Image: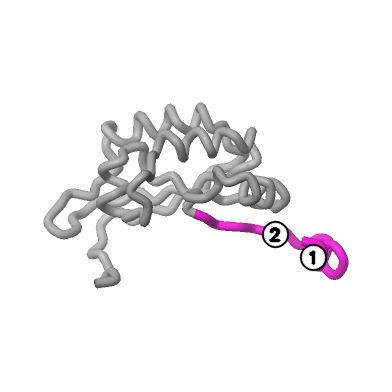
Amino acid sequence: IALRDKYFPQAKVSVLSNATFAHRTEVHQALMRVDNNILKLDTCCDEYIKMVNRPASSHYSVNDIINTLASFKGHVIIQTMFMKGTFERKNVDNTTDTYVTPWLKALRHIAPKHFHRLYVLHSKFPLLMQ
Protein backbone atom coordinates (compact mmCIF):
# COMPACT_ATOMS: atom_id res chain seq x y z
CA ILE A 1 0.00 0.00 0.00
CA ALA A 2 2.93 2.33 0.74
CA LEU A 3 4.31 1.81 -2.78
CA ARG A 4 0.87 2.43 -4.28
CA ASP A 5 0.54 5.61 -2.23
CA LYS A 6 3.96 6.81 -3.38
CA TYR A 7 3.89 5.88 -7.08
CA PHE A 8 0.24 5.42 -8.06
CA PRO A 9 -1.96 7.07 -5.43
CA GLN A 10 -4.99 6.90 -7.72
CA ALA A 11 -4.73 3.09 -8.08
CA LYS A 12 -7.01 0.83 -6.08
CA VAL A 13 -5.72 -2.12 -4.07
CA SER A 14 -8.02 -5.14 -4.29
CA VAL A 15 -7.88 -8.48 -2.50
CA LEU A 16 -10.08 -11.45 -3.43
CA SER A 17 -10.28 -14.14 -0.77
CA ASN A 18 -12.46 -17.02 0.35
CA ALA A 19 -12.48 -15.36 3.82
CA THR A 20 -11.22 -18.48 5.59
CA PHE A 21 -8.61 -16.55 7.58
CA ALA A 22 -10.35 -13.16 7.67
CA HIS A 23 -11.16 -13.70 11.36
CA ARG A 24 -7.45 -13.54 12.25
CA THR A 25 -6.63 -10.12 13.68
CA GLU A 26 -3.67 -9.43 11.38
CA VAL A 27 -5.59 -10.51 8.28
CA HIS A 28 -8.67 -8.51 9.29
CA GLN A 29 -6.56 -5.39 9.88
CA ALA A 30 -4.81 -5.78 6.53
CA LEU A 31 -8.12 -6.23 4.67
CA MET A 32 -9.45 -3.07 6.32
CA ARG A 33 -6.58 -1.16 4.64
CA VAL A 34 -7.31 -2.22 1.06
CA ASP A 35 -9.69 -0.33 -1.20
CA ASN A 36 -11.60 -3.40 -2.37
CA ASN A 37 -11.93 -6.15 0.20
CA ILE A 38 -13.63 -8.82 -1.94
CA LEU A 39 -14.69 -11.89 0.02
CA LYS A 40 -16.62 -14.95 -1.18
CA LEU A 41 -19.92 -16.22 0.13
CA ASP A 42 -21.43 -18.74 -2.28
CA THR A 43 -24.10 -20.08 0.05
CA CYS A 44 -25.08 -20.35 3.71
CA CYS A 45 -25.13 -24.15 3.74
CA ASP A 46 -22.14 -25.88 5.35
CA GLU A 47 -22.81 -29.15 3.50
CA TYR A 48 -22.85 -27.38 0.13
CA ILE A 49 -19.60 -25.54 0.91
CA LYS A 50 -17.92 -28.79 1.95
CA MET A 51 -19.05 -30.49 -1.25
CA VAL A 52 -18.24 -27.71 -3.75
CA ASN A 53 -15.66 -25.39 -2.18
CA ARG A 54 -13.91 -28.11 -0.17
CA PRO A 55 -12.40 -26.02 2.63
CA ALA A 56 -9.18 -27.46 4.03
CA SER A 57 -10.26 -27.01 7.64
CA SER A 58 -12.68 -29.48 9.18
CA HIS A 59 -13.76 -26.64 11.49
CA TYR A 60 -15.10 -24.47 8.64
CA SER A 61 -18.40 -22.85 9.58
CA VAL A 62 -20.50 -20.69 7.28
CA ASN A 63 -21.99 -18.91 10.31
CA ASP A 64 -18.48 -17.99 11.50
CA ILE A 65 -17.65 -16.69 8.01
CA ILE A 66 -20.86 -14.62 7.92
CA ASN A 67 -20.09 -13.09 11.31
CA THR A 68 -16.55 -12.34 10.17
CA LEU A 69 -17.86 -10.67 7.01
CA ALA A 70 -20.23 -8.57 9.13
CA SER A 71 -17.31 -7.52 11.36
CA PHE A 72 -15.94 -5.46 8.47
CA LYS A 73 -18.80 -2.98 9.09
CA GLY A 74 -19.56 -2.56 5.38
CA HIS A 75 -15.91 -2.47 4.24
CA VAL A 76 -16.44 -5.65 2.24
CA ILE A 77 -17.54 -6.57 -1.25
CA ILE A 78 -19.28 -9.93 -1.50
CA GLN A 79 -18.60 -12.20 -4.46
CA THR A 80 -20.94 -15.11 -5.07
CA MET A 81 -21.01 -17.82 -7.69
CA PHE A 82 -24.44 -19.23 -8.50
CA MET A 83 -24.43 -22.59 -10.24
CA LYS A 84 -26.81 -25.14 -11.71
CA GLY A 85 -25.69 -28.61 -12.55
CA THR A 86 -24.23 -31.75 -11.06
CA PHE A 87 -20.80 -32.66 -9.79
CA GLU A 88 -19.86 -36.23 -8.89
CA ARG A 89 -23.54 -37.11 -9.46
CA LYS A 90 -24.64 -34.59 -6.83
CA ASN A 91 -26.86 -31.59 -7.46
CA VAL A 92 -24.94 -28.32 -7.05
CA ASP A 93 -27.80 -25.95 -7.87
CA ASN A 94 -27.57 -23.09 -5.36
CA THR A 95 -30.07 -20.88 -7.21
CA THR A 96 -33.19 -22.20 -5.46
CA ASP A 97 -35.04 -20.53 -2.58
CA THR A 98 -33.49 -23.11 -0.25
CA TYR A 99 -30.10 -21.47 -0.83
CA VAL A 100 -30.95 -17.94 -1.94
CA THR A 101 -33.28 -16.99 0.94
CA PRO A 102 -30.70 -17.65 3.71
CA TRP A 103 -28.03 -16.02 1.53
CA LEU A 104 -30.13 -12.84 1.25
CA LYS A 105 -30.65 -12.87 5.03
CA ALA A 106 -26.88 -13.18 5.47
CA LEU A 107 -26.29 -10.23 3.12
CA ARG A 108 -28.62 -8.08 5.22
CA HIS A 109 -26.58 -9.02 8.30
CA ILE A 110 -23.22 -8.44 6.55
CA ALA A 111 -24.34 -5.14 4.98
CA PRO A 112 -21.60 -5.04 2.30
CA LYS A 113 -20.80 -1.87 0.42
CA HIS A 114 -21.01 -3.77 -2.88
CA PHE A 115 -21.92 -7.13 -4.27
CA HIS A 116 -20.25 -8.90 -7.18
CA ARG A 117 -21.82 -11.94 -8.71
CA LEU A 118 -20.80 -14.50 -11.25
CA TYR A 119 -23.45 -16.66 -12.88
CA VAL A 120 -22.58 -20.03 -14.31
CA LEU A 121 -26.05 -21.25 -15.19
CA HIS A 122 -25.42 -24.53 -16.98
CA SER A 123 -21.91 -25.75 -17.30
CA LYS A 124 -19.91 -28.93 -17.05
CA PHE A 125 -17.34 -28.60 -14.32
CA PRO A 126 -13.73 -28.42 -15.40
CA LEU A 127 -11.47 -31.16 -14.20
CA LEU A 128 -10.79 -30.47 -10.54
CA MET A 129 -7.62 -31.41 -8.75
CA GLN A 130 -7.66 -35.17 -8.45
Q: Residue 93, how many percent across, how many down?
A: 24, 46
Instruction: Say whether residue 106 is magenta.
Output: no
For disc 1, the marked residue is 4
Quadrant showing the C terminus:
bottom left
Classed neighbour count for the residue bearing mark 1: other residues with Cα under 10 Å, few (<14), some (14–19), many (≥20): few
Q: Residue 114, how many percent across, how many down?
A: 59, 42
Label 1's element? helix
| Closer-to-camera residue (40/84) | 40
User: Residue at (38%, 40%) from the top-left corner?
Assistant: 61
Quadrant showing the N terminus:
bottom right
Comes first in the chain, label 1 or label 2: 1
User: Residue at (36%, 44%) from the top-left corner?
Assistant: 59
Spatial CA span between label 1 and label 2: 8 Å
> Taking 63 as reference, is 31 above or below it?
below
* 97 displayed left or right of 29: left
Image disc number at residue 111: none
Amino acid beneath label 1: Arg
Question: Farthest residue toward the left?
Answer: 89
Q: Quadrant of residue 106?
A: top left
Which stretch did the figure color magenta?
1-17
Amino acid beneath label 2: Val
Instruction: Say whether residue 7 is magenta.
Output: yes
Query: Do the residues under discs 1 and 2 have CB atoms within 8 angstroms?
Result: yes
User: Residue at (43%, 53%) from the top-left corner?
Assistant: 118
Q: Residue 37, how many percent across, how many down?
A: 62, 50
* 29 displayed left or right of 50: right
* 61 displayed left or right of 93: right
Image disc number at residue 13: 2
Label 2's element? loop
> Taking 129 as reference, is 43 above or below it?
above
